[in-house]
Image: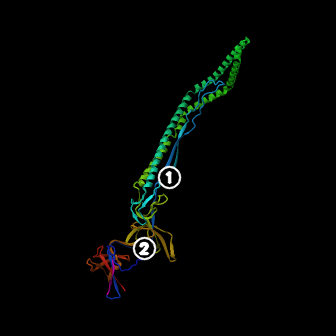
Amino acid sequence: MKKIIAAVCAVLIVAGGTGYGIYRYKKADKNTEGIIKEVSVEFGNVTAGVTESNSVNVSALSQTYDLTLASTSVSASVEASGGGSSSGGGMSMGGMGIGGGMGMGGGSSMPMGSTSVSTSSSSSSVELIVDEVFISAGQTVSEGDIIMSITQESIDAARTELTDAVSDAELALAQAKIEENETLLSAKYEYDTRIAEGSSALSTYNAKLDEIASNISALSSQIAETESEIAELEDAVANGNSQSEMQLTPARSQLENYQSQLSSAQSTRSSDELAAKQEYEEALMYYENAQQLYDIAVSDMGDATASAQEAVDTAKDNLKAFESYISDGNIKAEYSGTIMSVGYASGDTLSADTAIAEYADAETITVTVNVTEDDIAAVRLDEVVEVTFLSYPDEIFSGYVSEIGSSSSSANSSTVSYPVTVVITTVPETILTGMTANVTFITKQVKDVLYISNRAVITDGTDSYVTKKLADGTKEKLRVQTGFSNGNYVEVSGELSEGDTILIESKVE
């Protein structure tokens, strides 16, 4: 609705510079009383325009408990990654096991592996308990003011937890370095083994073939010798040598054993030679790919320590952030302004889900008023407007038009209005949502002039006068020149100065 200015008369005395006094005095006519109101000559702007009123909307700035810390647990381990095959030491040639263990193959007894780092990340809030709250709704604070304190016990517990996390992360880093070093040694051992076995693969293969042939030849010689020995023993027995007869049975048994071993060696010769060839080719394959296999084994080198180092850095950053946030045991205001609400009381545990405090955001204080179609032509986007508050009647603030609504509304069939949003740029010290603001869209304005209340001007024909109160309490009638008036205040000039006290006399029955 449009602003209505009403003068209310009361029996009171107001002291002070910007105030005014109202007092009664008896007239000669006992049925009439005179009321004198004191006003001051002001210096500033006289503005006329369209005035509308509505409730202020104050956006809130929320200060939250944002000490949410990331935590990363790290464990390092070596995982096997397919090292080569190992051929065991030797081949059994027949029943006697001649030849013993010659090892040939692409693998070794030390497993090929790479370091693996397992990480688990999460975030959590350090639990801090409120000791005392120093603010309340409606209070004005400045950025950096202490608004609440935290119990020392909860601070100490949180500090211990975060310090332990740094120690754990550093231990994991040391373990990761050890594991990666073991992986490097294992990879180097595998590489050297493959190169050595590949370099001697041909000679080892030929030695295997010679060993197979030599084993068969040795068995054949042993059979021939045993057969000759048996023949000699049989001749001795025929000549009545009883001692030779006792040796004959074991010799025949040994002959059967040799013959069995020879038969087995001859039957497995092809497969033994094929196995030797396969081992030879496998050794050559690992030899040719030794560098590539080594590079694969060490390709992740550094990842483990990098991940573990990141965990250490995170833990240290968390501790640093904690100390910075709560170094003196207090929480400070992040903004300047009026407190709208407080989320905690003594004994509460801070949580990221509950704001510590909410402040009136001086940069987003708005009021939306409805301007009728008769007056909407006086409103322009980005235009500067004057704002007054019922709570601060003697102060003028400023704002600008941020939005002119295109949709219309009507309280009745004959009145159409449009919503106009004003951002208030200068505000009183305390401003809360719901306060009534009067917005004046300026149609005319004179700047930097002396002005007084219209009611203080006495008109006599074409002349204008005011009654000035002198320092000794006496009155003086002064002639003035009037200029622009907005209906409430009028521009004046003459023998007046800013701050002069002017009297407004009126009668009541």
Q: Quadrant of residue 88?
A: top right
Chief SS of the magenta region: strand
Mark 2, secondary structure of its residue: strand
Q: Disc number at residue 50?
A: none
Q: Position of residue 508 (x, y in %)?
A: 36, 84
Give the residue pinned by disc 2: 51
| Residue furthest right in the image | 238
Q: Position of residue 287 (x, y in %)?
A: 56, 31
Q: Quick check: is 24 in the magenta stretch?
A: yes
Tag nearer the camera, 1 or 2: 1
| Residue furthest left in the image | 472
**Magenta stretch?**
21-27
Image quarter where the C terminus lies is bottom left
Vertical comparison of 193 with 238: above or below: below
Q: Quick check: is 239 in the magenta stretch?
A: no
Vertical comparison of 56 with 65: above or below: below
Q: Amino acid at mark 1?
A: Ser
Mark 1, secondary structure of its residue: strand
Q: Callout 1: few (<14), some (14-19), or many (20+) C-alpha neighbours within 10 Å?
A: few
Q: Amino acid at mark 2?
A: Thr
Q: Is residue 40 left or right of residue 161?
A: left
Q: Looking at the image, which is closer to me, 401 or 62? A: 62
Q: Callout 2: few (<14), some (14-19), or many (20+) C-alpha neighbours within 10 Å?
A: many
Query: Could you tell me how far apart the alpha carbons at marks 1 and 2 are, in whole angstroms?
Result: 53 Å
| Residue furthest front in the image | 242
Give the residue pinned by disc 1: 123
Q: Position of residue 32 (x, y in %)?
A: 35, 87
